Amino acid sequence: MAGPSCRQSRYIDDFMKAYSLFSLARNAMSYHRNWQRAWRSPDPKSKYDVVIIGGGGHGLATAYYLATQCGINNVAVIEKGWLGGGNTGRNTTIVRSNYLLDASAGMYEHAMKLWEGLSQELNYNVMFSQRGLLHLAHSVHDMQEIGRRGNAIHLNGIDSEFLTPEQVKEMLPIINLNCRYPVMGGLLQKRGGTARHDAVAWGYARGADAAGVDIIQNCEVRGVRVESNTVVGVETSRGFIGAGKVGSVAAGHSSVIAEMAGFKMPLECYPLQALVSEPIKPIIDCVVMSNGIHVYVSQSDKGELVVGSGSDAYNSYSQRGSFDLIEHTVGPLCELFPLFSRLRMLRQWAGIVDVTVDRSPILSKTPVKNLYFNCGWGTGGFKATPGSGHAFAHSIAAGEMNEIAAPFSIDRFNSGALIDEGAAAAVAH
Ligand SMILES: Cc1cc2nc3c(=O)[nH]c(=O)nc-3n(C[C@H](O)[C@H](O)[C@H](O)COP(=O)(O)OP(=O)(O)OC[C@H]3O[C@@H](n4cnc5c(N)ncnc54)[C@H](O)[C@@H]3O)c2cc1C
């Protein structure tokens, strides 16, 4: 497997020149009206070596690494709406790698290392901000959970620190430690933080396009054509597109795509919602999460508080959440930070998250030859975007899941080798 940093291809060299100091100055002279489009909008070809279904962050990252690291640039990304219009553009942008189990540490820490160089890799500012991420503990059970997880994280060489309530207060002077379930301690990952989600999709899209990938928006996959148990292409709203291999990266619609190919995906889909407040001056300089009282919050660079909690209780494909969950989100937020009770919430939205029984993703071959699935990221896949795309691209190219992806095979639901991240995933995204 090639290393995480991109081999500079001819296309990438061209692309870097297009954003040189010289072109910046030249475009400034014409009031920035003459920039080339960041990616083309080509008509689909009749056949590609690889077709990726889904133009979210994971699909675009997969295409980018296929073209720049695996030598496969006859690739199309087929997106039914617009790039990043799914969960990629709807999440609360939290990035961390403090998961309990070895397989998860392998995937999320791989992603973290890629995040740390991603703006340079893509020549696009993804606004990755390692401002630190603090998990609060409110009960003996919470303390045991962060204790066990913190130690496991250390054993995997990932940074984490235990904080006393006094240290939590020092970090967050406005916190109310004596809320209904008092804060007993915290687990801090200093390398955790946030990134700008749209920029991640756009950066990968621009890089993939520059490397020769066709990005086809407003094109819905409506069928998967299978002959002799081998995928041969996809039926789309713009006609049939042939493919040597197909990677489905359709998040909340993955089970719909699986059904088109004639098998079932062990996923349940729920709305997951988030809210943002009116912008205020900087007040919280880390991400704060509480599984115990069920809320998490960070502050965007614009000053808005970005707030989330759990998923809705019912299955749905509608991208709107229920009212009761808004109350369950705002209530604990005000309990932890009474000051915020005076803030107005500006926007609320939801995405459809694809949840597995063990709260870990699926990166896998399927019963259909040359058809691969990357899904099941549920409430926490944004942070994995670079690692997931990188591992999936190399796996598709090789025809076998690589060592990072292999534990996340669909076979685990038969063998029982589950990767239970229920506690690390909980409300924490
Ligand atoms: C409110 C909310 C908050 C979240 N917060 C966090 C967080 O803080 N941190 C974190 O790590 N994760 C978070 N997540 C989860 C994270 O957003 C997702 O796991 C991740 O973005 C999934 O990326 P993706 O590229 O797989 O999916 P998506 O971005 O959803 O992309 C899938 C794409 O497939 C397309 N598609 C579907 N069906 C078809 C079809 N038939 N034909 C063509 N295209 C199709 C869709 O239009 C979509 O664009 C959150 C999710 C939500 C909803």
Image (spheres, rainbow, N blue to C red):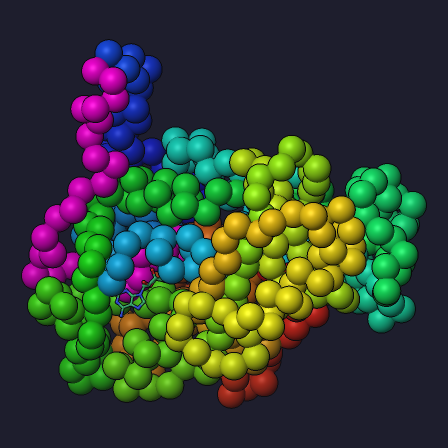
Residue 142's quadrant in the figure?
bottom right
Q: How many marks?
A: 0
Residue 171 higher or lower than 216, as above or below: above
The residue sitting at 31% across, 56% down in the picture is 55
Q: Position of residue 140 (x, y in %)?
A: 89, 68
Tell me the quadrant of ligand 1: bottom left
The residue sitting at 54% across, 59% down in the picture is 274
Camera-nearest residue between 22 and 80: 80
The residue sitting at 90% across, 56% down in the picture is 178
Q: Position of residue 36 (x, y in %)?
A: 20, 30
Can residue 44 be found in the magenta stretch?
A: yes
Q: Position of residue 354 (x, y in %)?
A: 46, 72
Q: In screen coordinates, is 45 left or right of 34?
A: left
Residue 17 higher or lower than 53, as above or below: above
Can residue 307 be found in the magenta stretch?
A: no
- Residue 110 can be seen in this image: no
Residue 418's quadrant in the figure?
bottom right
- Residue 239 can be seen in this image: yes
Q: Which residues are magenta?
A: 30-59
Q: In screen coordinates, is 161 left or right of 255?
A: right
Q: Position of residue 236 (x, y in %)?
A: 15, 69
Residue 8 higher or lower than 329, as above or below: above
The residue sitting at 61% across, 46% down in the picture is 305
> Quick one: quadrant of the C terminus?
bottom right
The chief SS type of the magenta part is: loop
